Image: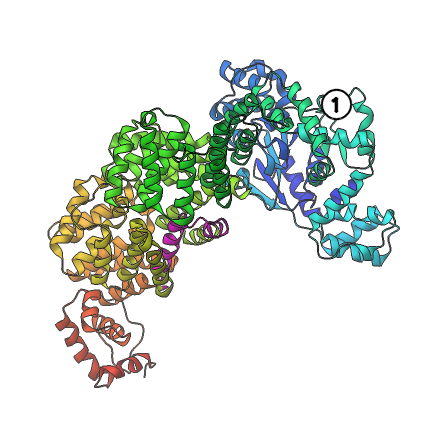
Amino acid sequence: MAFAVLVGREVERDLITAFVLGQAGTPVLVLRGEPGVGKTAVLDMAADLAAVQGIRVLRAAALEYEADLKFGALNQLLHPLSDGIDELGPAHREALNVIMGLEPGAMPSQLIAGAATLALLQAAATEDALLLIVDDVQWLDLPSAMALSYAARRWTGTNLRLLVAVRADSDDGFTRSGFRVRDLPPLDDGDSDALLRAAYPALTANVRRRLRADARGNPLALLELPVAFEKGSPPATLPTVLPLTDRLQRLFADRLASLPEGTRRMLLFVVLAGAENSVTFDDCAPTSQGLDDLPPAERAGIVHVNPRTGRVEFRHPLIRSAVIELSTSEERRQVHRILAEAFAMDPQRRAWHLGQAAVGPDEEIAASLEALSLQMIRHGDSRRATAAMLRAAELSTTDSDRARRTARAAYLGAAITGDLAETSRLLQQAHRAEARETPSLDAAVAAANQLLNDEGDATTAGRLLLATIRVHDRDIGSGAETMNEALHTLLYVGFFSGRPELWEDIGTVLDRAEAKPADTLWLLHNIFVDPAGATQEALQHLGEALDGLRFSADPLRIVRVVTAAAYVDRIGEAREALWRVIIDGRRGGALAKAIEALFLIAQLDFWEGNWDELIELAAEGLQWCADLGYSMLAGPGRLLRALVDAAQGRTQAADLAAEELLLWAAPRRLATYATYSSHIRCLSALGRSSFDEAYRHAASINAPGGFPRYAPHAVWLVLDLTEAAVRSGRLAEARAHAEAAVAAGLPEVSSRLRLLTTAALALTDPHDWRKLFEEALSAPGSDRWIFEYARTALLYGERLRREREPAVARTHLTAAVHTFERLQAIPWLERTRAELRAAGEPVSAEIRGSVLTPQEQAVAELAAAGLTNKEIAERLVLSARTVSTHLHRVFPKLGITTRSALRDAMSKPPA
């Protein structure tokens, strides 16, 4: 209805008009809103406006059941431009011919697909403007989304414009890519009433009021709910507490039930075939009379056939769910059998449909589904990969295959999809299916993942894996899928346990695997667990692997490659890939990997000073850990959240987190968790200038003077340990540690480690300290790590002030103050301000009529806060005797004679 586009959408109408005419200042616009809020109506308005202006429109709608189909939406969108493909270069022409189904062949890489899409669109828009419209992008298949996003970022200034619509509760690549977003709000009460009066003029005011209350401004609900009244249902019987989507689904299911049997069967065929490529009405029609089955659904407003594409489109996604609910299992199996025959030349699709249609064991189908499951993981469809593997287990003809596949599904659930609670049940099934004392490798991998993630029992998990791997010793270097996962799990066991004696056995096994540099196992073993030993060649291989993630949808590879980059500060190179994993997790996909992705971005946020985002991401990841039972995975998130607490002065919260980590680690002998606890306490102590305490915690992580293999966290505390050692009088240990960092090559690993190592050297060098501090602060990329950069500026300012260069000191201290203020790092801010006052920062007020010197005021404030002379001396880098002398001068100026009176005297206003 035309009025549905206009009522309450004046602002959107103006924006869309400007956008279509190229006057909105952006080539891409994301329209975001809740289901039924009218996004499609606004898209229709844009298409109509473009048609009036003579602008060509290409339109596609993503479908939930096509989300796993590579380039399905791109095929639909670009199909009208097929005639122009032959004018493109060979690589682009070949890629698009495969995507469009015009030629056989392997699907192109994402880079080629994106470039080919851009080339075709630019060629089509050479003379006239072109408007692309994509609806429901929350279900857009990832390859299509990436290709369109790639093209959209590169067509600035052309005649091309892209308008997309997405659900408000979804995370999509277009929004995350930074394109302009317009949120489409629900209608207000006045506009809701106007829409109802226009659509249903016979409704009374009381009925309209009731409808407005139920619809909550949702235009689709406003237009659909009155249908119930037309059937005689009084408004009082409408549900009052159910969510809107429940009410709409009830309505749609009721309307479906009244359709003829042939029409319902036709709709079931459309839904189950919707996951396939370019499915048109003719493709879906199960009988020659199929055309006669559709009109009742069209007349009921449930579907319509797109005249341009021939595709059957549902008015609302919830109708699809209703279609499934109203069908029987036998009806669904029959439809799947028909689809399997239709895709006889496509082994993967045929396997999926045969698997859904089968009623008894069939090894051929089971083997095909197992292979399909592995491919689905690589394509980012982890949820259906688990389903395919479970179905393969059900259809297995031997106990050993059934057990193996069930165990494999258990592993996928524990390690990828977040179904940790199901792992025990599936492992029990596998054990009953295959009665033998020694578990299969698949079962051992699944059990080890459960032990590690749920119970935190790295010791038992490690022993189980080592023992089982020895039984399959000949397969260690084979590259077989299950052995590969066993070795990856073993590496994580070693990391979290952190115990040298366990690492000795694990390292021996990993060395025998002979992984290639491009393999994630090689990257993790040679960089993640030993960043200090990472060679430039290894870092080059890591860079290539990170670059390869740009178009990857494999959550396992993405998370593993970025994890390899975690301790060498290269997470930022794969932020977009990590967000793809997170978005997939939020949609119910690879939840376990999404947790890790959240914490990896949170780690980057800590070093770059994006602490607000860190807190949000850590909270989300920790909530998922709690909901799904991933106790071990919670560790990094708890560490990062507590580091922010420590830096911002929430000492009680930081100490509690450190204590909880230690209590959880102790009975499980998890050295890495104990390291996390010590790190938190070290940072907290440094902020309070409790340098002796800070040294004890830092040295418990790694003794000064070396960076042993399998102790990766030590590289994070290069500056922490050195500063604590210098300020607590351990100059030899400090110097040895700074020199060890240089000898290990840490300055060559990353700009952050160069900053920390150079600052550590400056702290320990009595002669070239000025040159080293300047080098640390001026090195390319150093200012990216803003917290550590501000800490270095503070250390430099402190040294300059002690060397009687207060003016220069104030420059660096002031810069540090600004950063600490932005980060709300209160202890560090107070410490820096105290240094500023000691360096002669002008005092804005007199205390009881007497002006204290800057250093006297700094000493007095710290003493009033309860610090001892020794603690004040450590913080201000003075001797305890000098502190005592200052206090003796302060007392008569303030008119007091005892230390206990100092706090009151300092808190009084000037006379």
For the C terminus, the image quarter is bottom left
Q: Quadrant of residue 903?
A: bottom left
Q: Eyeballing the image, is 705 above or below 540? A: below
Colour basis: rainbow
Q: Position of residue 778 (x, y in %)?
A: 25, 45
Q: Is residue 638 magenta?
A: yes
Q: Position of residue 777 (x, y in %)?
A: 25, 48
Tell me the residue that label 1 is attached to: 286
Name the residue rendered at 87%, 47% in the picture. Answer: 230
Name the residue rendered at 32%, 29% in the picture. Answer: 541
For the N terminus, the image quarter is top right
Of the pair 132 and 446, the residue shown nearer to us? 446
Indicate left or right for 474 with 807 as reference. right
Q: Position of residue 832 (x, y in %)?
A: 28, 62
Q: Which residues are magenta?
A: 621-650
Indicate left or right for 545 with 413 as reference. left
Of the pair 356 and 316, the residue shown nearer to us? 356
Magenta stretch, overall SS: helix
Tell me if I can see residue 304 in this picture: yes
Amino acid at circle 1: Pro
Tell me if I can see residue 51 in this picture: no
Label 1 Cα neighbours within 10 Å, binned few <14 / some 14-19 / many ≥20: some
Q: Quadrant of residue 342?
A: top right
Q: Is residue 46 magenta?
A: no
Indicate left or right for 209 with 670 as reference. right
Q: Position of residue 325 (x, y in %)?
A: 71, 39
Give SS at disc 1: loop
Of the pair 611 and 368, the residue shown nearer to us? 368
